[in-house]
Amino acid sequence: MSELGIVYALLGAAVAVLLSGTGSAIGVGIAGQAAAGVVTEDPSKFAKVLIIQLLPGTQGLYGLLIGFITLSKIGVLGGGLADLDVQTGLLILAACLPIGVVGLLSAIAQGKTAASAIGIVAKKPDQFGKAMLFPAMVETYAILALLISFLSVTGIQV
Amino acid sequence: MAVLRMQRITICALKKDRKAILEKLQHFGTLEVDHVIGEDEDFKKMDTAGRRMGFEKAAAAADQALDVLDRYAPEKKSMLAALEGKQLISPETERAVQQERRGLLKTARKIIDLDREHGEQLAQIRKLENVIESLTPWMALDVPMQRLETERTVMLPGTMPGGETTERIQELLEERAPEIAGADVHIISREQNSVCLAVLCLKEDEAAVEEALRSEGFARPSQMSGQVPRRQKEKLEAEIQECRRIAAELEEKIGELAAQRTKLRITADYYRVRADKYQVLGQLPQSERTFVISGYIPQCQASRVADHLSEHYDCEVEVEDLKPDEEAPVILKNNPFSSSMEGVVESYGLPAKGEIDPTTIMSFFYVFFFGMMLSDAAYGLIVAVVCGILVWKYPRMSPGMRKSLKLFFYCGISTVVWGVLFGGYFGNIVDIVTEKFTGKTITPPALWFVPLDEPMKLLLFSLLFGVIHLFTGLAIKGYLCIRDGKILDFFCDVVLWFLLLAGLLLMLLPSSLFASIAQMEIVFPEWLNTLAKTLAAAGAIGIVLMSGRSSRNPALRIALGAYDLYNITGWLSDVLSYSRLLALGLATGVIASVINQMGSMLPNNVIGILFFILIFIVGHSMNLAINLLGAYVHTNRLQFVEFFGKFYEGGGRPFHPFRENTKYTDIKEEKIS
């Protein structure tokens, strides 16, 4: 059954990228709807709302980061698959879960916050600095999850 | 690091100098008008609302005319035009334009009128085009559409739903109106959903025929004209041509006026400035012969303004310190490096009364953390060089923009330093390129260590920097307490917390938990361990006893103190929040490596290398952009939430001086005589 180890590990990389990427896509989408509304009224606010719209996009990048590190660790990149037993494979899968799940949910929540923050920019463009901060608050938890996923993946001996 | 000290200046002068003094003050732009004296029998305020409205309308008209000009004869602007700042005008030009301002205002109104006429012509064209469209199906009809009749017969033009044929209509007529003598049905054109037809019948049968047809959806055309459709279309097209010609002429006329653009801008600004002046004038208490103006002025400017005024005019100038309860407007004043971070502080909130300006202390942490989060030497270099060139090339850009660019310039330099320390140059581009083309991997050495290899080490350092940052914040709070003479607050809210936190830290360092994280064991001498426990215990007990000191009920007091001790979790989360320094730095480096890896997978030939370069440029631009945004947002967060949370609230009012608040132009500084 030792062939399954690598499958679990790759599943881990897939989960990290898949869930957090989905979350970011939804989050950026929600914020984008609000941003488009603001730009119809006032095209000069394009740059500001675009920046806020981008904020929920980072979870996808964090997922990519974990996925990439996992891939290079198990040797999918550059050939020479590592010989993993099932336990190690499952360990890697577990290590990928935090950024996957937290990335998915936090990106959606951040997208909603970003949409509201875009509302601030629409009415009070000079409060841009504060508006940007609210979505950034949500992101903290994605960063914490990223950290644990990263430390776990790098910590697992292959 | 300071908030400029404000004073109150009060000027009492003769009415004959009113215009001159007001204009001078507006030119200096150092006074925020704020009247403390109300109206009384002698001093009355003047009603200037009407005249101010007039000026505002004039300014708005000039603005609108400029908008129109921009639409018809847009100026060629480079992408960086926004950085060029306002147009610089010589005082002579300004005066010349002032002389002909009435004429220019007429020009502005003319431009607006021309634009309106142009709009009317366009609307007319649209209307005519609609008529032509509705005529199109009737083109094959070679008689006029209006009621056409001979002595005995009449023609009924109209439309019916699609799919009708001559035969079916004949059948329909026979069925529904069998009494008629007969009708001649001509299909003129056929479209998807409708058929245009003309039916000829005897005059006495007209009503019956129409009734029968109507039961199947027959309708008379909405546009009926006395002309043959083809002829009418030609006529309408000629009309459209005429409208187009007029519109083009109007456009040309507006285009000719585009030469007046600069003058119109000066006029708009002139009226704007006058409107401001009249607004101030309306606030001044005035007696029969004199007037009073009063307001805030920065201390460093006060004597200059006072001297200038009392030298040139008959007036009484009084400069005095503010009353203790007065809340003055705020201007920040910092060294050239830190002043570029003033925008960051402003976006949080200016220091309220009694707070210090945190800009200078924050600026060092800001640049330090920013560089650590971006942490790629090549990215840092790009940011620093681009911002440096822009600041240098466009000396007249708006001050806010200038500050932001300078901020990114310094942050870019810091990023270069961190990049060199961590060995990041476009991620791992040097490794990839050397391996791809020479077969041998060359890794530029990191001056300190590579975060990807030793993440725990960097995590510990991140938390350490966080602890330093937070303790600095707490120390500033302590300083403020001492400065305001609140010794008890200083002891209870600052010293006790310092004791507790320092004790806890010292207890943590030799523990097995720390050893497993840091992979190194720290052994303290016994006395230090005891000291740590004592400190922590003393701090904790002190906090429990003292935090609720405002409450007299001893039970409540202890409860409040215990609740305050719970804030220790707040400190824990604050410190952990600095782990983003590691996470964001890793994100930059790893994603850059992903891009490089993608490029290196291409074959080693010309096309492969071309695509490699393409991937390199596009990928790294995107990575730079998104990580720049991330570093900016999260550095701000660390300052606003973790650092400011310890000692700073903000809520000060920005200084809004009475000045020449222009939109398009700046007048070159004349030597002040």
Image (cartoon, coloured by chain):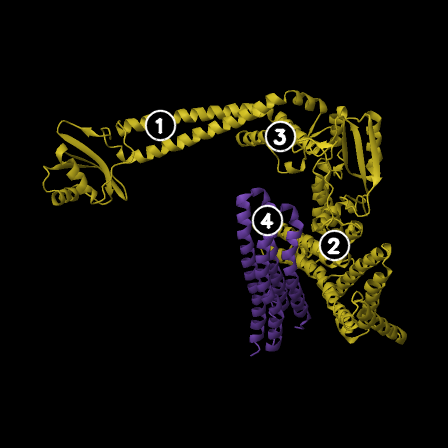
Chain colours: A purple, B yellow
Tag 2 residue: B649
Mark 3 or mark 2: name the one nearer the start of the chain.
3
| Numbered disc total | 4
Q: CA distance from mark 2 to mark 1?
A: 70 Å
Nearer the viewer's eye, disc 3 or disc 2? 3
Disc 1 marks a residue whose amino acid type is Glu
Disc 4 marks a residue whose amino acid type is Val
Q: What chain does mark 1 sit on?
A: B
> Relative to B454, is B63 above or below?
above
Image quadrant of residue A115? bottom right
Tag 3 residue: B50
Are the residues at dot 1 and dot 3 in contact (C-beta closer than 8 Å)?
Answer: no
Q: CA distance from mark 4 to mark 1?
A: 46 Å
Image quadrant of residue B296? top right
Q: Residues within 10 Å of mark 1 (few under 14, many from 20)?
A: some
Apparent side of residue B440 relative to residue B170 in the rendered image (left or right): right
Q: What chain does mark 2 sit on?
A: B
Asked whether the residues under marks 4 and 2 belong to the same chain, the reply is no
Write the residue at 79% across / 48% down: B325
